[in-house]
């Protein structure tokens, strides 16, 4: 039977995804996780591996406009998808969420920050109104060991207000 | 993770052909239970058949007295679907409490009930609402579907296609989550229909179950106070490092009262 088989790619086109608006071919073993593909194959090391058990949120990226934990997605599951990593947010200036994190001192060691920022962007897109309670609920999947979250919540509220006013 | 081959099915027929063709395949939907299990090397499938691209499994419809949800609908979509929110707000609210936002963006209804984790949320809704689980081969009543710890009535390679929920008069879910995993330490779904009340409990035992004593008391009077004096036997309940059986029994009463209060507010 001819079936799509990743390890025998001779009879099928090579799967691709878009990462930060650039098309890339997905290569490597079928068991390659999206986070490892981004970091090791593409060199996009802004996406971090924290717990590797889908608890901590350090590996969060945007997949077709929704925040996902890239340690719990196979690279091949993302074929045909648009992926945005922290590297994809910056243009000439910092993204408004990044600027808000800087302004409100919402990071100390910075390890959780890329995942926090992409989670923040997702919640700002999805929620017309963001108050402190909602932000804290939406942050359930992101752990920070330094800040105690106070300034992260402030930064997200400030970024949401700024993005809404634009 | 052990090595495996990956296949992407575009149709249900193709998925079934692939599953029949390989030695030890597994179905991959959102992957938010299967991939963590494989990372711990607790599962070692020869092949993964990814069904996420099968559009026939993504559909939410409210027809007559039935709400039908495609097996591939994510928790995030069920939680925010205006159709679900209007038909069974308790079910939408339950979906919004599963895991965290990222898990809800990937995890699916079909994946959750096929796995039948003893602390998963959806099984409680399926059981209390008397859902009908449609598969590639048949349809199965929820009361016949959840058999035991991680065990369901599904046969090998049988794929859940959609779940039909009869729309109740009112319903609600109350959950006491484990603060680390966000799985239910105890979760109670209460559904009130013309025929009476059903109460399903997850997280407390080896598999989701109906609490018939509580349901009978609530059928007589659908008020939190109707539960006064109804005791819950802790004998069959889980007793582990997270909570003792007695504590879980106590929580069942508390969560049931909370669910009744929320359900009454929705009438």
Image (cartoon, coloured by chain):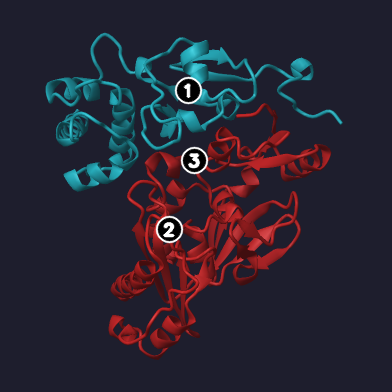
In-front residue for pair A43/A162: A43
The image quarter containing residue B7 is top right
In-front residue for pair B162/B43: B43
Report the chain holding disc 1. A
Disc 3/disc 2 C-alpha distance (Å): 29 Å
The image quarter containing residue B18 is top right
The residue carrying mark 3 is B106
Quarter that holds the C terminus of chain A: top left
Quarter that holds the N terminus of chain A: top right
Question: Residue at point 37% right, 70% down?
Answer: B246
Disc 2/disc 1 C-alpha distance (Å): 34 Å
In this rendering, the label closer to the viewer, 2 or 1: 2
Location of residue B53 in the rendering, given as x and y in whole percent from the top left corner: 62, 37
Letter of the chain in cyan: A
Q: Is residue B216 above or below residue B210?
A: below
Q: Residues within 10 Å of mark 2 (few under 14, many from 20)?
A: few
Letter of the chain in red: B
The residue carrying mark 2 is B240
The image quarter containing residue B229 is bottom left
Question: Of helix, strand and loop, which one carries label 1?
Answer: helix
Q: Residues within 10 Å of mark 1 (few under 14, many from 20)?
A: many
């Amino acid at each position: 039977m001819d079936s799509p088989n990743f390890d025998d790619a001779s009879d099928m086109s090579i799967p691709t995804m878009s990462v930060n608006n650039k098309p890339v071919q997905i290569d490597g073993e079928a068991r390659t996780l999206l986070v490892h593909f981004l970091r090791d194959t593409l060199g996009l090391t802004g996406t971090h591996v924290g717990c590797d058990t889908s608890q901590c949120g350090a590996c969060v990226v945007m997949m077709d406009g929704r925040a996902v934990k890239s340690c719990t997605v196979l690279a091949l599951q993302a074929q045909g998808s648009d992926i945005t990593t922290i590297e994809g947010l910056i243009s000439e200036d910092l993204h408004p969420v990044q600027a808000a994190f800087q302004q409100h001192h919402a990071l100390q060691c910075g390890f959780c920050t890329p995942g926090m920022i992409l989670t923040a962007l997702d919640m700002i897109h999805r929620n017309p109104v963001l108050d402190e309670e909602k932000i804290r609920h939406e942050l359930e999947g992101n752990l920070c060991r330094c800040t105690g979250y106070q300034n992260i919540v402030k930064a997200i509220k400030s970024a949401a207000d700024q993005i809404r006013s634009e | 993770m052990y090595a495996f081959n990956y296949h992407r099915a575009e149709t249900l027929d193709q998925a079934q052909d692939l599953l029949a063709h390989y030695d030890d395949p597994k179905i991959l939907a959102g992957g938010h239970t299967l991939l963590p299990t494989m990372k711990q090397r607790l599962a070692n499938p020869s092949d993964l058949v990814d069904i996420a691209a099968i559009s026939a499994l993504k559909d939410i419809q409210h027809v007559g007295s039935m709400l039908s949800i495609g097996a591939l609908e994510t928790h995030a979509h069920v939680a925010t679907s205006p159709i679900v929110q209007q038909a069974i707000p308790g079910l939408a609210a339950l979906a919004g409490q599963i895991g965290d936002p990222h898990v809800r963006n990937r995890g699916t209804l079909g994946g959750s009930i096929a796995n039948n984790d003893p602390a998963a949320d959806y099984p409680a809704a399926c059981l209390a609402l008397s859902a009908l689980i449609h598969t590639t081969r048949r349809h199965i009543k929820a009361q016949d579907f959840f058999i035991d710890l991680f065990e369901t009535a599904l046969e090998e390679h049988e794929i859940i296609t959609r779940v039909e929920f009869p729309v109740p008069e009112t319903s609600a879910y109350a959950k006491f989550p484990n603060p680390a995993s966000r799985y239910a330490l105890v979760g109670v779904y209460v559904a009130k229909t013309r025929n009476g009340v059903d109460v399903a409990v997850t997280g407390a035992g080896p598999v989701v179950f109906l609490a018939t004593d509580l349901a009978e008391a609530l059928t007589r009077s659908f008020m939190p106070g109707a539960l006064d004096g109804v005791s819950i036997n802790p004998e069959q309940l889980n007793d582990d490092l997270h909570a003792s059986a007695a504590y879980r029994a106590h929580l069942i009463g508390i969560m049931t009262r909370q669910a009744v209060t929320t359900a009454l507010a929705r009438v």
